[in-house]
Image (spheres, coloured by chain):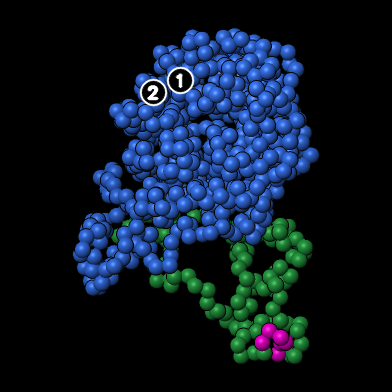
Chain colours: A blue, B green
Amino acid sequence: MGNIVRGAGAGAKLLPHRSFTAEGDTYLYAAETGGLFRMDDGVRDALSALASAAAGAVPAEFVSDLRRAGLLDTAGRRGPADRTAHPPLRLRTLVLLLTTSCNLACRYCYEDREEGCSRPGDGQGGPSAAAGMDAPGSVAAADGQERPGAVAGGGTPREMSLESLRGAITFLLEHDGQGGPSAAAGMDAPGSIAAADGQGGPSAAAGMDAPGSVAAAAGTNRKVSVTFFGGEPLLRFPLIRSAVGEARRMARERGKEISFSITTNGTLLTREIAGFLKENGISVCLSIDGPREIHDRNRPYASGRGSYGDVARGTSLLMENRNGFPVAARVTLGRGAVDVRKTFDHLRGLGFDEVGFAPASAAEGSPAALTEEELRAVMDGFRDLADGYVDDVRERRVPAFSNMSQILALIHRGDPMPYPCGAGIGMLAVDPSGTFYPCHRLCGIGDAFGGTETGISEAVRARFLEGARRRRESACDACWAKNFCSGGCYHDAYLRQGDLFAPSVHYCRWIKELFLLGLQTYVRIQNETPTFLDVMLGERGIA
Amino acid sequence: MKHLKGVNRKGRKIGNTDPDAPVVEAQGIVPFMHTCTSVFNPGYENDWTGSTKQLCTPIETDLFGTTDMYCWWPGQAPDTYNNPDWNADCTRAMKDWMKLKVVKPEW
């Protein structure tokens, strides 16, 4: 023990942290720096002394270690919260809402039936009007002709026209960032802002810049990606088909690389579509909730008939036409459908390489929202899957529980995360009329960022990011889990509390439990297979 | 650090920094000075020969002259051992400085 320096720790404020035990050792996670440490008993005692009135009796060497680890407040030195500049827009992923129509009527759907997802044919003869609700597969063959811009009731269009789509892709390809080197200097040092909006969506992580991205500083992104989203995007397959070819040509002309992904309910997949997805290297995220009895409960057609049979058929077509990209299943956990283990095993059996779970976003008290008890059951299921994850790593199998992969990546890099996701930073969504919003879920909610013609309004974007940062600095500042959730999904907060920037307090306890599970799993994996995370993150291009 | 051992990348990074090193503050500890002015030399208006040829210029216009170790207060540039290519595309600094590669620490 070193000298006891009276007053060494006196007056020092303990910054948010979490200590926990795993594998017989005690560990410490410091939220200000993102550092994870194994600690000895002395540190544990020092922490409890600092938390009480005995702060002055803490030996100086412990105070020094804790200060370096980011556990003690040092005047004038705070994290990224003190920065004033928002990161420049470094557009890498554009989510295209091809249509707001959907052939399913999921019970937990966050789209307001009045404004959002609507039955195909509700508009005025949109391209998919011909598709019968319960006639999967018939749409792609419909007529191959696009009739752009169906407008429902004279309001905003519900179907994206080829012109809008072209405008959006041109914007993505020609967008040179708002910043250039000087604005990029206001960014957080290590490329920062890691993944996870916790609510899934089409690969939220894809909207993020890879760390150390050179392109970001130069103001351009050579690699860009487009996500086809809806409603149900396959209702607009003819549009997708022409868009992919055209976008590739446009990208080539501008010396950029473009990649595509699609989030679909899978009911409309045909051999032709699956072949097209394979040929064009389009990665697929399929929404499926598990075995028939679970899936059909929450994801029926509007007629009430379950959609499982059609999804399973679509899935097998996808599996026959694999294109080298992992095929991901996205499970929405709705009320009465929380058997995580059963769902996971079932989907692995169907051939999915990754399975990710997200609780349904729903207003407080809505019948779709999970009850406290159900959230507990989900967490128990996650614990079970985390054990399986560690086993997979030990036996050199690629783990499929993608929520855990995402959390482990965050812990491994340890970057502070000032925003919950890439919305408005690396990712934007464009609605059928060609209007930009921060993400696909926020289309029509809050202020639009601009349009394909007019460009992005920096003032609106700054206001949006300011809201996010204020939330993190006020409500979440003292939370040890702030680097993981950063206040949570904007859209979820909007649904629950009517405010995009309300912290998702309803999930706080649950999310903290989840991240603690992540920390414990991280330690287990690092002890057994220390190379795994570097390899996994490297393969995914996020390390 | 004696009592905390870094486990994740960030933790190890923090643990590996020299505990005795002062909190990083830029210091003018350079073997000798060359080209740029100090308080003992004539000011910014003219150099020791009375001309303006050797005065400080903006980093963009004299990238390589203002980032070497002989500068009194050198501009920050990546080290060329670990990042030999950081200025590969920048043949004419005044024109091409935007093509400089940005090097970020593995943090």
- Indicate the quadrant where residue A128 lies: top right
Label 1 residue SS: loop
Residue A47 highlighted magenta (yes or no): no
Q: What residue does disc 1 label?
A: A107
Q: Is residue A145 left or right of residue A307?
A: right
Q: Between residue B4 and residue A124, name the one nearer to us.
A: A124
Label 2 residue SS: loop
State the image coordinates of residue A107 (x, y, percent, origin top left). Answer: 46, 20
- Indicate the quadrant where residue A369 lies: top left
Residue at image coords 51%, 59% = A83
Q: How many marks?
A: 2
The chain identifier of the residue carrying mark 1 reads A
What segment is highlighted magenta in the picture?
B43-48
Let me know if residue A93 appears in the view. no
State the image coordinates of residue A489 (x, y, percent, origin top left). Answer: 47, 39
Q: Does B90 appear above or below A534? A: below
Residue, far front: A154
What's the mark number on residue A23? none
Report crowding for label 1: few under 14, some 14 to 19, many 20 or more residues within 10 A (C-alpha): some
Cβ–Cβ under 8 Å for marks 1 and 2: yes
Let me know if residue A242 appears in the view. yes
Residue at image coords 55%, 47% = A464
Q: Between residue A451 and residue A376, name the one nearer to us.
A: A451
| Amino acid identity at mark 2 | Pro
Prevailing secondary structure class for the magenta stretch in the rendered image? loop
The chain identifier of the residue carrying mark 2 reads A
Residue, far right: A253
State the image coordinates of residue A472 (x, y, percent, origin top left). Answer: 44, 50
Query: Which badge, 1 or 2, is on the more N-terminal residue?
Result: 1
Q: What residue does disc 2 label?
A: A367
